Amino acid sequence: MATNETVILDEAGVGRALTRIAHEILERNKGVERLALVGIRSGGAHLAVQLQKRIAEIEKVEVPCGTVDITMYRDDLAARGNLPVGKTDIPFPLDGQRVVLVDDVLYTGRTIRAAMDALIDLGRPRSIQLAVLIDRGHRELPIRADYVGRNVPTAQEEDVKVRFDDSCLPVEVRLVKP
Amino acid sequence: MPFRHKHIIALRDLSKEEIELLISTAESMREINQRDIKKVPTLRGKTIINLFYESSTRTRTSFEIAAKRLSADTINISPSTSSATKGETLADTAMNLLAMGPDIIIMRHAVSGSHYFLANKVTCSIINAGDGAHEHPSQGLLDMLTMKDKFGRLDGLKVAIIGDITHSRVARSNIQGLTRLGSSIYLAGPPTMIPPGVERLGNVTVCATMKEALQDADVVMMLRIQQERQGKTLMPNTREYARYFGLNPTNLQLAKPNAMVMHPGPINRGVEMSSYVVDGPQSHILKQVENGVAVRMAMLYHVSGGGAME
């Protein structure tokens, strides 16, 4: 590990945060009825799968889980150049669902804005909630998360990285100083 | 890997990785085409001009649908309604269009290389929708995507291309793209329609007969006889052509049992292909058209990126 990186959440810590978020989602929605998870490619998609597993362990029900790619909805395409476009894969109708949008790091809120636009183009969910593993602050849009793994105060020059292993299981979260 | 071209004029100018990126982007774009609301805001506020100096149904419509699904504004200009009929030069037309601030000009022109000429003059992106007998990159890409859909790969495929190779920009784009991705090409056609030295383009074999090219082919790509581009001297008549170079259920059996049949359209039924084959189970012709929209969305998306330079 480079000297400018510190681990702020280890594997067990990530696991405990996800378990707590799974319980909170079930508590807030009073169970799994019409509940669906949608992860934002790619980190959020991996985390959504983990939340789906935990909800299945608690409630013995597999809630629908999909993936949304927001590249086509970005507001900074001209500045960012050609980002690779991933597939949006939501294999269930969104209409009337209580959708929990899942992302790894909540920062400016622009990704979430794009993801909400993408979801609304695909259907009319009854509600959209937001679950993130890390909230690092510095919002540029009026967006807040309903479920947060850990609040991490950061400077704008810093970076937060959520690392996954080869089978897409979360390993740890690192804070990278410039 | 970022795509670093401002223009897409020929697959010859693109690397293997860039071609693969365009194809994989097209695979992602297909999901949008299956939605109820087939529109994403990606190119909102961009202006795209379709400048077609040659007639076209498929390509122009497909580019226009692709642009609209990405929320760009599109304008179509065809020669019969443009000042070209009054004698305006291509450069003058382009400079006047440019003054209205388009972001992309999609052009089809009868003169090979006219897009390179134009790209040196304009500040917007140029996409080639077919230039003379040079290239037709979007057709090459959509053909490759259609083959990849069926076989999961392009590497190691035997592709037979039959017909008027000399006048075919579709053949040239397919040869440039497919040989980069590891397919082997077998060409057959009347000797007057095979360009000399075509083997130098890569893994290309010129066959003496159509049978030889069809033998164990994974893909049979038939080309249209371009009666508008050639004189009457290259072949005696269409009936004789159909007899020696037409695809029918009998000679198709020489290819592999699961071989796919392709044609860039428009088809001269009964000349290069019999209707039994056009409408038969091995035909992927309409699948090619369907993939065309996704491929053109990918091309428009990648030339619009801010990282583009050339």
Image (tube, coloured by chain):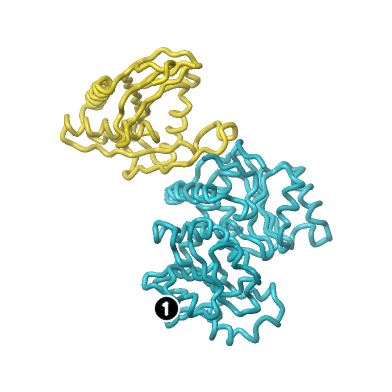
Chain colours: A yellow, B cyan
In this rendering, position of residue A44 left or right of residue A110: left
In this rendering, position of residue B51 left or right of residue A46: right
Q: Quadrant of residue A19?
A: top left
Tell me residue B11's x, y (percent).
59, 55
Residue drawn at point x = 48 percent, y = 27 percent: A110
Tell me residue A102's x, y (percent).
35, 30
**In the image, farthest residue toward the right:** B87
Query: In the image shown, does B211 or B108 lie closer to the viewer?
Result: B211
In this rendering, position of residue A7 left or right of residue A13: right
Q: Secondary structure at mark 1?
A: loop
Q: Which residue is mark 1?
A: B254
Tell me residue B234's x, y (percent).
67, 80
Question: If the image is split into quadrants, where does the C terminus of chain B sit?
Answer: top right
Mark 1 burial class by Cα count in 10 Å: few <14, some 14-19, many 20+: some
Q: How many marks?
A: 1
Q: Is residue B44 above or below residue B218?
A: above
Q: Quadrant of residue A171?
A: top left
Chain ID at mark 1: B
Residue A7 visible within the image: yes
Q: Quadrant of residue B174?
A: bottom right
Mark 1 belongs to which amino acid?
Answer: Leu
Residue drawn at point x = 82 percent, y = 56 percent: B89
Residue A28 visible within the image: no
Query: In the image shown, does B86 or B200 lie closer to the viewer?
Result: B200
Query: In the image shown, does A28 or B159 lie closer to the viewer?
Result: B159
Q: Is residue A131 above or below residue B166?
A: above
Tell me residue A166's x, y (percent).
32, 36
